[in-house]
Image: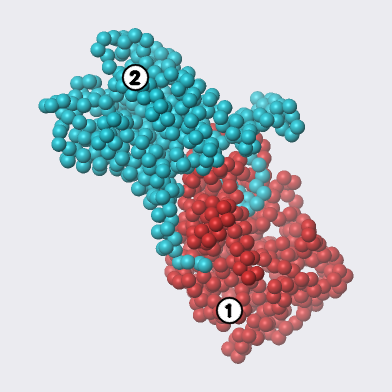
Amino acid sequence: MKNALIKLFDTLEPYFTGSGKYKALEPIFDATRTLFLFPSPKTKTSPFIRDHLDLKRYMSFVILALFPVLLFGIYNTGFQSGVAQGQQFGLIQCFLVGAYYVLPIIIVSYGVGFLWEILFAVIRKHKISEGFLVTGLLFPLTLPPTIPLWQVAVGISFGVVIGKEIFGGTGRNLLNPALTARAFVFFSYPISMSGEIWVAANNTIDGFSGATALAITGSGAKDIVQALTDKGFDLPHLFFGLIPGSIGETSAFCCLLGAAFLMITGIANYRIICGGISGLIITSILCFFISEGHDTWAHAGPLYHLCAGGFLLGISFMATDPVSAPGTNPARWIYGVCIGFFTIIIRVVNPAFVEGVMLAILFMNVFAPLLDHMVIQYKTSKRIPNV
Amino acid sequence: MEKLTINKGFKLKIAGRPDAFIKKIPPQKTVAVSALDIPYIRPKLLVQENERVQTGSPIFCDKRDRTIQYVSPATGLIKEIQFGPRRRLLAVIIECEEQDDYLTFDPLSDLNVIETEELISHLKKGGLWQCFRQFPYKDTANSEHRPPMIIVSLDGNDIFSPNPGVLLKNQHDLFEFGLNVLKKFSQNIIVTVRESHSNNLESSQKYVTHLVPDIFPSWDPGVVLYHLKNSFDDNVSWCISVDHLIMMAKFLSTGHYPVEKLVTISKPDELKPHYLIRQGMPIKSFIGTIPKKNLVSTGQFNGRLASIDDYAGFFENTFNVIAVDESEQMFGFVHLGTDKLTMSKTFLSCLTDHDIAVDATLHGEERACINCSYCENICPNDLMPQFIMKALVTDEIEDALQLGLLDCCRCGLCAYACPSKIELSEILTNGIENYYATISKS
């Protein structure tokens, strides 16, 4: 099997390298070959021994951590579709219906995104970076299952080109490309991204609302927790995720599984995740006590804020993107806490944007270099100078 | 004895530890004075081909300071002078005679009566002054300068460098004498040893001032200096390795150039004694034959790439034979990896505790820096190699210096750890050397 593969790639190689016919497509050839056959060239300079961890494995661990979220997202899309049509789908039917809605979105996201990646790799003559594997999967998970596919294509194009490639590609981007793509879709096509669009179904029964938990408010005597419970958004549902919402965000449990995996393996920095969660909890407790009415999200308390919306998806997988996050440890704590803080502030103070985490992360992405700068200034001032 | 707390570094167990007995290598037909391992040198040849040299007579000196000489470790005819590209001197090869004919100097037995200036000129003539290295560039020490401290590390540059217990055996008097020589230059003499090597030092143990943990490279003088220094002035300390100190003591007490050298070889699956060789012996004579694909280095993390046809250099006492397995693994990036060397937690090997075999391949391809901080987490001197690298590649040398570039001990761990396979160590080393070249011109 392996020898056959090596032989196959070796026979194809002349076409894609040197003066071959398809020289322009060399990055695709190279990416495919290294996907199947992991390269390990000889070290030319000291240190002569190197760690086995490389970027391919680094990124595939994020994909691995996203699997529970993705699988549950597919299942839940099918399940919600059943609920909207007044039916109870079985496990397999949920997956099939879910896959029918979700897979095209993922395929379009990967397909269009990779086209841009390849185009830039060909023009810039470098190898295709693995970073897009994560971006291309994260972006669909932040979208509602009803999104038109052409908007997915436009969104990922914006995310890859404006969010990443114009800065110079992976490693040089200021903002998280997946969130840049989502923000673009969110502001450009508000009709597809807000309101009662969170459940995909052909014909819905009367009185069914596809709104997310964050869009709900109480009224008068009815406080927010009561209003949420009435609509089916009680805490167990919010935690395990059988609720309408964007594909990947609904299950707090699956997001926490992924986050735990990433923190244990050291791929995501625990400081960002822990900082984010503590920032959110502290801010929501403060809001709980200073809010006047009992009927808004300000009075929802930390558990509801943690489990509702996309906060856990964002803090586990998008805020921890090492490129757009700060590179020093104290800055990572500040960054995390600020994301938690701004998420609550946007949710509570600005009802126009019910989902605050996307804007909070993008906002802190912009400040990450400044935080780094301050930490580095402090650290160098503590060093005994050597010049 | 004080214990230094150093938390960061390479903590994994790797295979290849040398055994603690000595094997003597018989005399060889040729030896050489190698110029490959001498940092910063601009050699000026003092001999010609077919000229006869004595043991201890100068072969070449450093153009920057002609009093610093590199001397012959054997008696015989100069057989060949090897040059590399752009007429860079590689080695001067000497055909050995059977009997050593030493260039003799007056032995110095009483340090109290000798002037420091005389001692310096004595060491320079004997070809041993260059044993003193001066921070932060680790160039040959400036003999007019008196350092705030001299660091003597009993362990070498590699994890598997000669064990000081083996090295100092029966030479404890020389070690004491050597330390007294150092007191002529500085009152603050630091002697460090790895924790695991501290128990068989016998009578030399009382001279150890600092114990360092068994984490590579905490015994490197650069790391020790970083963790000990209190002020800006400490930056220009000196260091000397223990085998050079013994050589110096032997030279001063006998008046003859000491030609013996103790080296270790780390290689997979074989008996690995310490080897007692003559300075400048061909590497082949003690390494033996190795598989063609394997690579020879003089330090797994911070040595040079040596060829099997090279000669042992003045500054080298560890040789690693590292296997090279360039074969492509199917879906290599998803292997469970129970035997893969990694400081991350992404392979199952992080749960086991056995010695892991090493190989000299990159395990991946070069990519852009993703700011993951793995290099920062392993740097023993609290540097942020990723930010220094970015400053250097954008030519912001001032920023790089601000970030502590000159505290870099060049251990190579940053490049070891980098998942993007960026040559951080090479970039930082070049940064230091270019800066040094610039300031020493002006």
Asked whether A3 or A308 is in front, the reply is A308
| Residue B53 placement: quadrant | bottom right
At x 56%, y 31%, the residue is A117
Residue A349 in the image: state x and y as whole percent. 25, 36
Q: For mark 2, what is the residue?
A: A197
Asked whether disc 2 touches disc 1, contact meaning CB atoms under 8 Å apart, the reply is no
Residue drawn at point x = 29 percent, y = 24 percent:
A212
The answer, for residue B16, to whether it is visible in the render is no
Question: Residue at point 44% right, 71% down?
Answer: B230
Q: Nearer the viewer, residue A161 or B339?
A: A161
For residue B143, which quarter of the picture? Answer: bottom right
**Amino acid type of the residue tagged 1 in the rendering:** His
- The quadrant of the image that shows the C terminus of chain B is bottom right
Q: Which residue lies furthest to the left in this view?
A: A221
Q: How far apart are marks 2 and 1 (CA)?
A: 77 Å
Tag 2: amino acid: Ile
Q: Which of A256 and B189 is in front in this view?
A: A256
The chain letter for the residue carrying disc 2 is: A
Query: What chain is tagged by disc 1?
Result: B
Disc 2 element = loop
Name the quadrant containing residue A213: top left
Q: Which chain is cyan?
A: A
Q: In this view, does B166 lie above or below A344?
A: below
Which of B237 and B292 lies nearest the eye of the viewer?
B237
> Looking at the colours in the rendered structure, which chain would you say is drawn in red?
B
